[in-house]
Amino acid sequence: MSREREAEHLDTRILATIERWHRHGDSLSDAEFDDLAIAIFDYQLRYAPAYAAYCAGYGISPSALPTTWRAIPPLPARAFKEAAIAAFPSECAELLFESSGTTLGAPSRHFLENRRLYDASLLAGFERAMLGDGARLRYLLLVPNPAQRPHSSLGYMMGRVAAQFGDGETGWYLNEDRFLLDAFTADIDDACERAQPVCIATTAFSLLHLLEAFEERGKTLALPAGSRMMETGGFKGRERSVAREELYARAMHAFGISAESILAEYGMSELCSQYYDLPGSERRVADAIHRVKIAPPWLRTRVLDERERDCAPGTIGALAHIDLANRSSCLAVLTEDLGASLDEGIVLLGRESGAALRGCSLDAEDLRRA
Amino acid sequence: MTALSSLSTRAIATAIGDAATRWCDADFPPRVRVTEDIAERTGYSVPAVEFALDALFGELRTAALLETIGRELGDPAALDAPTPRILPLGRIAILSSRTTIGVAIPAMCFALCAKNDVLVKDREDRLVAAFAETLGEELEAFDRALHVENWDARHKGTRLQDARLIVVYGNDETIANVTSEHAGSARTIGFGSRTSIGFLGAAAQSEPAARAVALAGAARDASLYEGDGCMSLHALFFERSSAGDPNALAAEFAAAMERAAIEFPVGTRSTSQRAAMLQERNLAAFRAAAGNGAAFCDEHLSFLVLLAPPTQEPPKFLPRTVVLLPVGSLEEIAAYVERHALPVECLGVTGTPRSYAELASRIGAARIAPLGEMQRPPLGAHHGGRPRIAEYVRFLDVDGEHL
């Protein structure tokens, strides 16, 4: 069978899985997940040479396949910055997503052979997590505009969501790095006047800027019933940050929405599928309250210790995602994020801080005490 | 007048030396009491803490104090009545470090030798307070001259107000904040975050016994204090040679790192550090699969040696994690340091340290030491390239007298 036929066959299986969950809520049993994951992994070992060479270091090859998804070696996310991780000729990619990171001066690049899997996965995931009531919303987007940043996975995702589920009046309010506050204000005021519920999709950093601008103007709103907010991205790499609780409290005050109306999305450019907050789920992990995040059934996560063993539930470790929609690249990705697994899903505890130079150092806490 | 102004510098140094001698005894009860507390606070293993205490107090000898004072100020008696030519500043505050065990103590001792009143902000393990108590037993005047506290946010405010000089061991942000928010009219001396690197020349690589000694020393320098502290080795450069096999050298170094963990067991690590080490190891494995570099570690990932990672990347600054970088010349080391703006404290070498003075000068290193001795700076070594005592005094010139 040709590579193309194999890929087509796998995509059909994955799309069917997505469709069954999207339409009927069908999940995947462990055996079903293993079966599909190993089939995809086998394909990638044969057609993704960079990943295959890495797996050879684990003693894994097409002739020595694991039997469970948990034994699939997760590729460090940073490998996407250094090589084309593709199980097809990457020059034929229909989609290319790049991260904004600049380690080594190169962004992470995720080549996708076609958009079918990505679109199906993101639309199903978003609709189930954010649109359980079937609302047709106006999308006010404080995320990269695909017209300017065609390789932003977040921009692409929200463009597809707005086109599929929106009211046709989608607005984009980031012009490169500039925030179009006046346009946003005019459009959200208009939505309020027309009682048109909205979905504000924003990075945490943009939301903070928006809230500061509203607070400076003394502006508050009462968004139409059914309005909601999708926040994503945290504050990685930013000098300024605020605690999520504070950010959400300020957003609730500014927009007159409830805590349940704000859901965080967790994704990355190296994955085709996303996690979302499970509404009303808060659990205490590592002495702090965290919202539980849930994934569609084709995305599972391992929490690893430094020996790459699975941590016990509730124990913090490095997150490694196995995303079956990543058929054309690498299905197992070791992230720089920390988290813990729980019965319902995972909690995300942030990112490896990266190691800082620690000389004879007194930390900021000590400073405040001086 | 300060509390010590009527005493001779020699008497002060003698009392300090005598107190330190008592602390050199591992069974000295105050030392026994704080050792576990230091290990708990820092997360370092007890052998590492014992090493730190031995190194610290072993250097604090009366003769070494007087020799250092003499080297910087001329005659130690110049500080003494009835005609002192060198005077104390007055009150000096020292804010000690989270990561380096007892880093405030040498500074404190030199400030006392200069007859200043000294305030030290201690850590939770109360090491400085315990040593201050021993000092008081040796010389009662220390009880009036020296105040050691572990204050917290509820009691901020006045402590630093009367200080003429504030000595801060901290990162750049900390130092800037102390300077701008707390120093007032006081001068601030900051000892910011720094790191250390090493070099293994071709000659040292070619002779097996010398190579083994150098690598064992480098492993110790990298393993102590889990890579914290300005003397910890994070990057080891080795000279390329046609005879040498980089992979074999890295494997030998990895074996030395493994042995170092026997003498100094691995300390406590954060989840974030462990995850970062896993990420680095796996990324190196990915690169190795593509024919670039290699990663060496044990199954517990207690250490990590990264052979030839891209030079665009800085060292990792993770526990017991060393990048091993081949170079064709010392110029490449300087270029690496400059590229990453590394603030280098110590350059570890083999052979004759003096022959690396030009490189040390270029990269801003404050000290050149043999590999294996990087973590044992002599008392007189100029931490951060600064004087040991001259910062804590002012000079009084009298026309007509010998200057």
Image: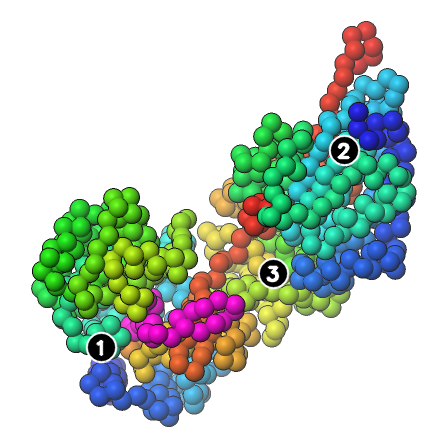
The reply to whether discs 3 and 1 touch (Cβ–Cβ < 8 Å) is no
Most foreground residue, A229 or B297: A229
Which of labels 2 and 3 is toward the front? 2
Q: Position of residue A241 (x, y in %)?
A: 40, 52
Q: How is the image coloured?
A: rainbow
**Residue, x 52% and y 68% (percent of image)?**
A287
Picture quadrant where residue A269 is located: bottom left
Q: Which residues are magenta?
A: A264-291
Q: Identify the residue under disc 1.
A: A132
**Residue, x 86% and y 36% (percent of image)?**
B141
Q: Which mark is residue B319?
A: 3
Most foreground residue, A127 or B278: A127
Mark 1 nearby-residue class (10 Å; few <14, some 14–19, many ≥20): few
Q: Which mark is residue B117?
A: 2
The reply to whether discs 1 and 2 touch (Cβ–Cβ < 8 Å) is no
Say which chain tag 1 marks.
Answer: A
Closer to the N terminus: mark 2 or mark 3? 2
**Residue, x 18% and y 52% (percent of image)?**
A184
In-image side of B132 versus B231 (left or right): right
In-image side of A320 versus A323 (left or right): right
